Image: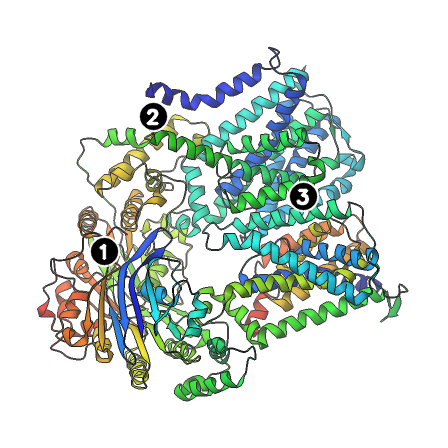
Amino acid sequence: MLSAVGVTGGYGDLRVLWGVDVAVRPGRTTVVLGRNGAGKTSLLCAVAGLLPTVSQGTVTLDGKDLGGVPAHRRVRAGLALVQENKRVFHARTVEENLLLGGYALGGLGLRSTARRAALEQAYQRFPILAERRRAPAGSLSGGQQQMLAIGQALMPGPKLLMLDEPSAGLAPAIVDEVLTMVAALRDEGLSILLVEQRVENALAIADDVVVMENGRVVTSGPKAGFDDGAVIREVYLGRSGERLTTDNR
Amino acid sequence: MTTVWAGLATGAIYSLVAIGYNVVLLASGTFNFAHAQLLMVGTFLAYTGAVTLGLPAVPTVLLAAAGTAAIALIEERVAIRPLLGRSDAHGALITTVGAATILDGLAAAIWGRQPLTVPSGLPDRPLTLLGGAVRPVDLALIGLTLLLGVGLHLWTRHTLVGLASLASAEDRQAASARGINVRLLGVGAFVLAGAIAGAFGLLVGARTYAVFDLGHALALFGFVAIAIGGSGSQLGGLIGGFATGLIYAFAVRYIGAAYPQLVVFGVFLLILFLRPRGLFGAALERRV
Amino acid sequence: MAAVVNRLRPLGVPILLLLLLAGPGTGLINSYWSRTVMLIAILSLLVSGLNVVLGYAGELAMGQVALYAVGAYVAGYLGVRLGMTDVTLALAAAVLAAVVVGLVTGVPGLRLGGWSLAMVTFFLVILVPNLIDVFEHFTGGTLGLAAAVPTLFGAEITGDRLYILILVVTGLWFAVARNLLLSRHGNMFLVLRQSPILASMLGVSVYRLKLLVYVVGAIPAALAGALFSMLDGFIAPETFTFALALSVLAASVVGGSTSVYGALAGAAVMQLGQQTFTQFQDWQLVIYGAFLLLAGVLFNRGLAGLFHDGVAAACRRGWLPQNRPSAKAAAASEGREPHLGRLDGAVLRTEGLSKSFGGNKALQDVSVEARPGEVTALIGPNGSGKTTLLNLICGFYRPSGGRLLLDEEQVGGRAPYRIARLGVARTFQTPLIPQHMSTLAFVATGRYVTHRVGLLAAVLRLPAFRRGYAADDAEAYALLRLLGIEDVADRPVNSLALGTRRLVEVARSLAAGPRVFLFDEVGSGLDESDLVVLERAIEMIRAAGGTVILVEHNFPLVLKLADRIHVLSQGQLIATGTPAEIQADRRVLAEYTGATDDEATEPATRKGGR
């Protein structure tokens, strides 16, 4: 359903992605692994239309070319991105954050029928958010903020959910909760593109795996090929011998 | 009490400028130095409508609002949009001063350098209210400005577009990731600010005359209003504007006609020095 | 030939000045042109003052006109009312008054940054007629003030003498400005403009430096005012208008704000345009505005920028000799094996350090210690609080609780520049790199505070300045060599690739000879060969006795370099130990990878170490 081919780009003259290919099959989950600075976040940004410069490559969603489509229209096309570090609007309340998440639902009424329905759904999925609906998002705990960020992204009913390190900075119990949530979303049939540092957790959810290093894909394929712990070594302990040496970012 | 009314009427104009600054600041994060000039253009368009074309009040207001909004739109296109994505921090500092100067110059070239009297259409005879004299046009100015400030405050907090503008002021990238068209919002803010400035042209012009360098003093006092009220707070700007007007009026009455600007300047320096976030900035923030 | 051109290059401006000075005496310049030259000189003083503030400190100050008025009235008052007509006295008094006004408006105006200085100074311009009125006794009010004939040691200064006086004062100011801006001080202004964070990390108080720049920029404006009062012999409020303020601003951006001599070009364009085109008066505001708009949008480096581009192109094509400022420094370090001198490392310790943002506890009760001659690594998954800890150590955040000790002295909560001055140097996850500066000069800014060359020494180009400059360059070059990147010494530092930028930052942090090094993700984005260089550099710092704190995701690099590893997770310290202990700690790897299966995370299978 999502296919990005040969994506090259970065921030002005500074290139951070070099011909990256990534695909998500309908109803499946693709996990992107790699060390810090490998270009994972930039890849998600490129798909979401938030990378300042994309010089080459195509991104298609359900066969529709997204080249040149600005970020806010990509949301309407069915892409949803949960950015890293729980980027919710701190000064706004939980409910306002969720309603803003439903901005792409169309119509200008703050509490239109569609937005109210989506809000009810979000509260059902995250009861804790319903309890704290009037609290400013900045006063929530890290885990609650992450729930809010996911809830926001789900408001417009996306086809593809992209998550950038949803477990970062959370306590183990919360991490489990968040990742269980992601697994449940997958089981509901949502297509997911997940960037996650916790390789084991991520692999438990994954159908396909992409490993990135220095802005390039070094290996990718169905999860079956990545089951033996070799991935962990590759990603975190460095690849033995065959590192790319052409990096000139 | 007459002094209070005079202060509030002058203050209303400063509030209007502060409100205009805030509308743009909240939606696009830019400080539009030229906003006071938009108000100046509004007074001239009101003059053109009411005197040159001899239109009644309502069409005059509509004409001024539409014309000023169009100018604001052009300003955004020429002075702000080319800078988006630039790293240089003071680009907009220079270009909006440039836009303001061009507007000054064009106004002087089109309407001349002499002040023009703008008829408000309201009776000129002062009313006595709460023990002070006040002209009906000043009363209208005070009332409508109050209404506008409070209305905008409520609108930003209770409508989808208003909330979206607050959100994009807080984090532009996150806002566009939520499907908000931040660029359109920024353009819209310019147009809205322009339309407001134009719509008030008639009332402001009736109080101050239409004159090409009206913008200078207004820009300054509007900024003082922001400094008092805290930037990005509509209510703060409203209160800050009225406070500045009152300080001005009382300085004229009790210290002397040569001193009000000096006194306001002193207050401005003091606030920057003691409460850089504005007197009401923190208090209003906590209420969020 | 090349040597001759290079030798003559710095003489170009003085020769031009000499020709101009001789102009009227030799009949080369008639009285119309001599007046024009004087007016350009006076305007260029105003513009130069603005350039210092706008182009180098990045603050918009519109008050040049007010200072101009101050200079004029101070000189006028001294002459008319007190009978002190001596030129030197008038100029000195003008400068003093400018400093006072600069301090009064700069202290509050610079507190907030952004628009507040612009507005304070703009206000000042609007107040000028007001103030002239209020101080009518001193200023003659709206009627104006007829100035006395200026004298120098008793001789009257009129006609050609006045011409020479104005040109000499202007020339002297530009010499001062050149010497100030083309020095470490000017470089530091550029760093400040690009990144106040970096400036404070280099030990500079941002506020005080901005104030200094602003006050320096006030001086030429007041000089211009005093000279103008002598030229016109009459001071009237109509001279000091907002339109003049705008023409100064327009001249600045047209000439190029971030340049020394751009002020002359901009002033000449404005003055000549005003005199040549009769329609200029009617349309002057539109013209100024258009200049500002165009310059702001299109060529924000002005005429000076075009000139520099032209020179650079000519150098590339071999029409002009290449200018290699690093040649001398390279020669000085020739034949020496790159090595580091002894570093006086300090013990850095945190005791129960905590930080929370709103409801989010970013760091809780963290106690770590980093010792001299050791590499202490901080590792942990994203969001575990590593960068928060670094920011606390640097003073960018105030701790919510706990203590931060540097050699047993409590430093938690101090301003970043104070902590930097105690010898804490840092690199950034995204390298902070200024514009308009060579790599060599940027690395040398690391020594700005520790190896300080005074302002006066720079302005007068005293021997102390030359020695300091040569030492700075030699040291910077040696550090670049140490990191194997000496070939980029003369390249603009903002043209470098990410990997090279990281190494440049390491060199910059080394330049201060600090006691504690904080390296934030310094290995990410480096290729294999750069990584080898980096490893060697860190090992050298350790061997030299420096305290190194490494925040790093590259696990093999950490295992290889670290003496001690602290593992953070969710803002808490979960393990501390040697690399071997940490490797053996299953909890750590589990925390890192989220693994639950013991088999898969068996650390003994590690074979990734290169």
The image quadrant of residue A124 is: bottom left
Q: CA–CA distance between discs 1 and 3?
A: 56 Å
Residue at image mark 2:
C321
Assess whether mark 1 and mark 2 are in contact (beta carbons under 8 angstroms).
no
> Do badges 1 and 3 share one subunit?
yes
Q: In the rendered view, would you say A246 is above or below B180?
A: above
Q: Given this view, does label 1 or label 3 mark the residue nearer the observer? A: 3
Dot 1 alpha-carbon crowd within 10 angstroms: few under 14, some 14 to 19, many 20 or more: many
Asked if residue B187 shows in the view, the reply is yes
State the SS at label 2.
loop
Of the pair C245 and C300, the residue shown nearer to us: C300
Residue A230 lies, in percent from the top left, at: 13, 70
> Between disc 2 and disc 1, whose residue precedes?
2
Three-letter amino acid code of the residue under disc 1: Arg
Residue at image mark 1:
C371
Three-letter amino acid code of the residue under disc 3: Val
Of the pair C210 and A98, the residue shown nearer to us: A98
Q: On what subunit does the disc labeled 2 rest?
A: C
Q: Given this view, does label 2 or label 1 mark the residue nearer the observer? A: 2
Quadrant of the drawing holding the C terminus of chain B: bottom right
> Between disc 3 and disc 2, whose residue precedes?
3
Assess whether mark 2 and mark 3 are in contact (beta carbons under 8 angstroms).
no
Residue B245 lies, in percent from the top left, at: 74, 60
Q: How is the protein colored in the picture?
A: rainbow
Q: In the rendered view, would you say C422 is above or below B62?
A: above
Q: CA–CA distance between discs 3 and 2?
A: 46 Å
Residue C577 lies, in percent from the top left, at: 17, 65
> Do badges 3 and 2 share one subunit?
yes
Q: On what subunit does the disc labeled 3 rest?
A: C
